[in-house]
Amino acid sequence: MLGLLNEQPLHGYELKKRLSETLGPLWGISFGSLYPALRRLERSGAITETVSEGDDGPAAPIVPTGSVKGDLAAALRRRPRSTRRTRKAYRLTDAGRELFIELLTAPETDDERSFALRLSFCRHLTGPERLSFLERRRTQLTQRLAPVRRTAPSRTVDRYTRSLLEHRAQTTQHDLEWIDELIAEERELVERTEEGAASA
């Protein structure tokens, strides 16, 4: 939520929609979990509420009730009625921006969902911060792969379990190669940025 609000103020419905698009359907974001989280962030000073006016809708028809008659009833029927509604939008505060960067750069657990979430907002970090984040992930993957490389599956392990272990090792190795590519690209980007700054 902090990452999305860092980009622009959003209404609750828009925020839920963007969260679903960013995180995917498996995260199951509901209004029942969204609004309590927004209230907690607001109480902590990380976000603030702003009020904006919604679009005009069609004018509501005025149906005479019989209690007003004649010229007054006709005038009421002709008078346009505004259907403009106010809507609450949520905006990130300076404290919220600090919290967002703090959460992005904090040491993370070896968890796929946590890593995916942080990576999706990695663009908000500086080049060196992104590089540090990716290198920490590389260390985690290397540590995960090390025991598999050292120990061959026992002969007593059935072929299904052995196949599962091999699949996990291959998946981790693939992720490691992917992270290495991201790190190489990030290092090149950091070097170009530093060279540009030195030239200026």
Image (cartoon, rainbow, N blue to C red):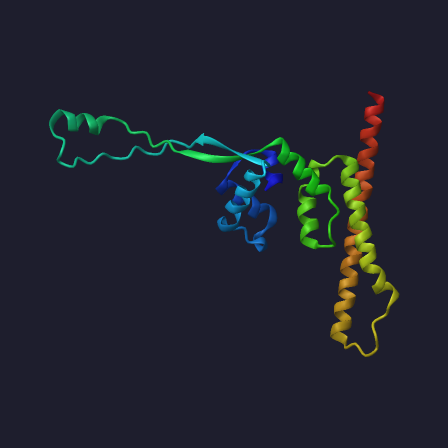
User: Residue, x 57% and y 33% (percent of image)?
Assistant: 8
Q: Residue at x 57, y 36 (%)?
A: 47
Query: How far across and down, in percent of the image, does residue 101 sit?
Result: 69, 38
Residue at (30, 32) in percent of width and height: 59
Q: Dividing the image into 4 quarters, which one contains the C terminus?
A: top right
Outermost residue to the front:
43
Q: In the image, residue 185 lies at what x, y percent?
A: 80, 40
Q: How many marks do you count on the picture?
A: 0
34 relative to 86, above or below: below
Farthest-out residue, left: 70
In depth, the one of 159 and 138 nearer the eye is 138
Tell me which residue sits at (27%, 27%) in the image. Answer: 80
Q: Give how far across and how far down residue 169 sits, in percent.
A: 79, 62
Q: Position of residue 192 (x, y in %)?
A: 82, 31
* 10 lies left or right of 174: left
Q: Residue furthest right?
A: 150
Residue 87 appears left or right of 176:
left
